[in-house]
Image (cartoon, rainbow, N blue to C red):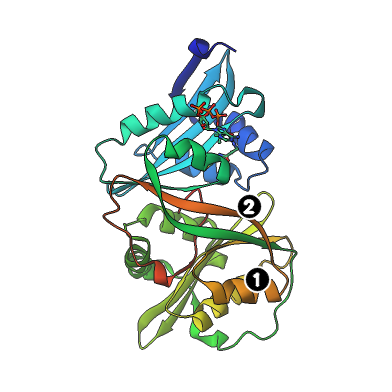
Amino acid sequence: MRLSDVIIRPITMSDLSGALRLSSEQNWNQTEKEWSFMIQNPLNTCLLADYHGKIIGTTVAINYSNDMAWISMVLVDKVYRGQGISKLLLKQVLESTHSWKSVKLDATAEGQNVYKQFNFIDELSITRLTREPMIYTDVGDDHLMTPVRTEDLAEIIGYDQLVFGVNRSRLITWLHQEFSKNAWVLKRNDGIAGIVMGREGRNYNHIGPVMASGFNDAAMLIKKLINQFNHKPIVADVLNDKEEVIKWLNDIGFSKQRTFVRMHQNDNPWPGNPKQQYLICGPEFG
Ligand SMILES: CC(C)(COP(=O)(O)OP(=O)(O)OC[C@H]1O[C@@H](n2cnc3c(N)ncnc32)[C@H](O)[C@@H]1OP(=O)(O)O)[C@@H](O)C(=O)NCCC(=O)NCCS
């Protein structure tokens, strides 16, 4: 392959099937919904590598309210790996984010090697756990949870911002619109004590984000989605410092599939409050 023949250009909706091919061949969990959500936001930078008309690589920088660029969907076709394609894509996408104060991502082990070359440093680690569908009978104070209503969204977006670090209003609104039955809020004393949201993916139903102030609330929110997702394998990406959650999920039959490392370039001005972050939304969204 001649690297000089590779063209880097924006991804459009007509490239959807080529982009989905790459994530599906890697056995990633995205469906057309995630790709469309990313591509259709004109504030995101979505790039592909085109080699003689074939899509052989992708990357996306998600714009979180002009504060944080979240690097996502870094994928190269197996046949073309090890020849500098990801570096070409990242160089260009990081040029588009070079004036941003916060540039972050969740890296696979393979990706970590590439990002180190672009001065990304480790921030925290995450374990991916999966399980066959199950029903959980001991649901706890289940009645404290209510389905998220449209009128709750502003408060939930504010809560997500406190925990994640920046405003992700588009993401939270989209999760609610597309997967409303998986969005639950836990309220106490008229305030939010926790939230859970979830997506039906290609291979798994994905539980997350889960944000809460303690283990019991987090577990209650997770159980809610375990029971809703009782027809397809489930996946949960847990922050490694949540040892109690990891142990509990292992005890009920989840097993570790892989790990991710959250990394940031330059400074990390909006670290959020990871103490309250139990499950992330997924490495593609943070
Ligand atoms: C990770 C991935 C995108 C790399 O793409 P690539 O085009 O093969 O990478 P490049 O050829 O541009 O290599 C970039 C650098 O990464 C490192 N690297 C790439 N693949 C590596 C591997 N398998 N093991 C160790 N280092 C590796 C090398 O240091 C290389 O730099 P060098 O050639 O100057 O030493 C590709 O392997 C892939 O699609 N993997 C599956 C999806 C994935 O995990 N994506 C990352 C998401 S966070």
Name the image quarter holding residue 205: bottom right
Establish if 214 lies above or below 119.
Answer: below
**184 or 81: nearer the eye?**
81
Q: Amino acid at mark 2?
A: Gly
Question: x, y percentage for residue 206?
Answer: 60, 59
**173 or 242: nearer the eye?**
242
Q: Quadrant of the N terminus?
A: top right
Q: Is mark 2 within 8 Å of ligand 1?
A: no
Residue at (50% x, 69% y) in the render = 196
Q: Quadrant of ligand 1?
A: top right
Residue 11 visible in image: no
**Distance (Cα) linking label 1 and label 2:** 14 Å
Other-residue count near label 2 (Cα within 10 Å), few / some / many at <14 / 14–19 / ≥20: some
Counting every numbered tag in the picture gives 2
Residue 44 visible in image: yes
**16 or 100: nearer the eye?**
100
Q: Secondary structure at mark 2?
A: loop
Other-residue count near label 1 (Cα within 10 Å), few / some / many at <14 / 14–19 / ≥20: many
Numbered tag placed on residue 201 in the rendering: 2
Question: x, y percentage for residue 238?
Answer: 54, 64
Left or right of 105, for residue 68: left
Q: Amino acid at mark 1?
A: Ile
Question: x, y percentage for residue 24?
Answer: 66, 39
Numbered tag placed on residue 226 in the rendering: 1
Asked if marks 1 and 2 touch (Cβ < 8 Å), the reply is: no
Residue at (68% x, 43% y) in the render = 27
Question: x, y percentage for residue 200?
Answer: 62, 56
Left or right of 202, for residue 73: left
Q: Earlier in the sequence, mark 1 or mark 2?
A: 2
Residue at (29% x, 44% y) in the render = 266
Q: Secondary structure at mark 1?
A: helix
Q: Quadrant of the C terminus?
A: bottom left
